[in-house]
Image: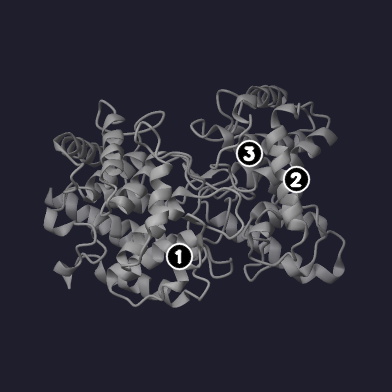
Amino acid sequence: MQRARDLLLTDIRALVADLGAAGGLMGPSIYDTAQVLRLAPPAEGVWPALEWLVAQQGADGGWGNPSVPRARDVPTLAALLAIHAHDRRRSFGAVLTRGLAFLRRQSEHWTAPLPDDLPVGVELLFPRLLEEAAAAGMEISTAQYSALLALGHKRRRLIAGLTLRPGTTPVHSWEALQAAAERGVIDETGGVGHSPAATAAWLRASQGRAELADLRDAAERFLHDAAHATGANIPGVVPTAWPITRFEQAFGLYALLLGGVLRHPALEDVAAAQLRDVADAITPAGIGFSDHFVGDGDDTAALVAVMRAWGMPVNERILTQYAHQDHYCTYPGELQPSLTATAHAVHALLLLDLPCDEPQRFLVRRQLLDGRWHGEKWNGAWLYPTSRTLVALRDTAHIDAVRRGISAVVAFQRADGGWGMLEPNIEETAYAVLALHGTQGHPGCGDDARRALARGQEWLLHNYRPLAANPRTFWLAKENYRPERLARLIEAVATLTAVLPAREARPEAMEQYS
């Protein structure tokens, strides 16, 4: 166990030291890659990226993670449009046929009422893609999307009265707005809304505009730099958002907090350097996923929790400004609330010794009858909101809710000791292990939970591969994605709990290192 402990600490130390480096690491996006190929294809040519795109088609004809079905329509239709646009020899006819058949089978997922866990901007993006598909001669019925189309009309009305500003949520979906290409939406990264798809659309709209030549050069550099973040090394294969510097730092440090190793002697110096850097970047509006994107309640809550656990002073107003009715919002004006933005806020508020009864009750009301929390807009794996909510409610009066949540985690463990919606995998197992590890000592954590934790930790030790590529995508934005460095850190921290003595890994018991 000593060898495994040393190897894991070395791996975690390297990951923490690199948090935010080069704008963060983000796996490749089907949707954004398709939009770049169609709207602003790379100078090196489209075929390597187009072949990559075709290779991502699933056996059922769709693109995207099968375990998160409503996140598949946008990447699937965008991929079909990109392939159709470049397949002049009609080499991919079967690919297009299977993709269109997949979309026809998707109707069951779009009946009203729509859930809260919709992909970012889907109500804007998909109607626009449908219009472009019709113009391209693709026959796709819109009847099944009536509720989504109505939501899109509502969102467009809200946006219509706004001035589009760089680094804001409407601009992140600029490609769907059919707006004129203007200087005012380009931010300091050189892109539009930190979105390769939006940036590609702006480049298409700004063609022939000599007065925008300098910004066009910056936008092209943005797409080039964003492509490097995927590690795919294929021109035109881009992530869903970039840069993600502060997101990677805030939630990377939060992972250390959940694992009880934020100030472990082997990690404290690199964690301290990262915390100083990200804490220096916080503003009265909180912090966003980069310095050039508007602040949000989720990144802010995670960072406030880490700062407080470390003993740093925090202005409570930085967090409480995101309170909205009975919960905490990610972005003001959002139509669908986030479970985990509220869970992270509750966690931070309890560390700040601030009242948070209403958001606690919000979380309890959202618990399913089987004890899980599901329907999270930022992550499609139910173990993610369940894990984060159990940590948030652990030290509250909601003992029964925590007990039922722990029981649900235990009940869904696979026979081999892992967890997974479709099959056991390291990321979902890491969420489960951190949930059970973080609730040790709670009245709802009995012998069955302790046995499940031990089996899960053993599974992680057996399956942890620090350098192996993980194609699974659970995090949600415009589609599913994987924040590579952050996800690896969460997996490594969860695995580390298997080999650290209890005194070295106790959530928020930091005084032993001071």
Image position, residue 478 (x, y; %): 60, 46
According to the image, label 3 marks what residue? 75
Q: How many marks?
A: 3
Q: Earlier in the sequence, mark 1 or mark 2?
A: 2
Mark 3 falls on what kind of element?
helix
What residue is rendered at 21% in x and 65% in y? 266
Please name the amino acid that badge 2 sits on. Answer: His
According to the image, label 2 marks what residue? 153
Image position, residue 410 (x, y; %): 26, 33
Mark 1 falls on what kind of element?
helix
Between label 2 and label 3, give the one nearer the viewer: 2
Residue 270 in view, yes or no: no
Image position, residue 431 (x, y; %): 33, 44
Marks 2 and 3, how far apart at CA? 21 Å
Please name the amino acid that badge 3 sits on. Answer: Pro
Compared with 32, 209 (above or below) is below
Q: Residues within 10 Å of mark 3 (few under 14, many from 20)?
A: many
Q: Residues within 10 Å of mark 2 (few under 14, many from 20)?
A: some
Viewport quadrant of the C terminus: bottom left
Compared with 421, 242 (above or below) is below
Marks 1 and 2, how far apart at CA? 30 Å
Query: Is 84 on the left or on the right of 398, as rendered?
Result: right
Mark 2 falls on what kind of element?
helix
Please name the amino acid that badge 1 sits on. Answer: Thr
Image position, residue 313 (x, y; %): 34, 78
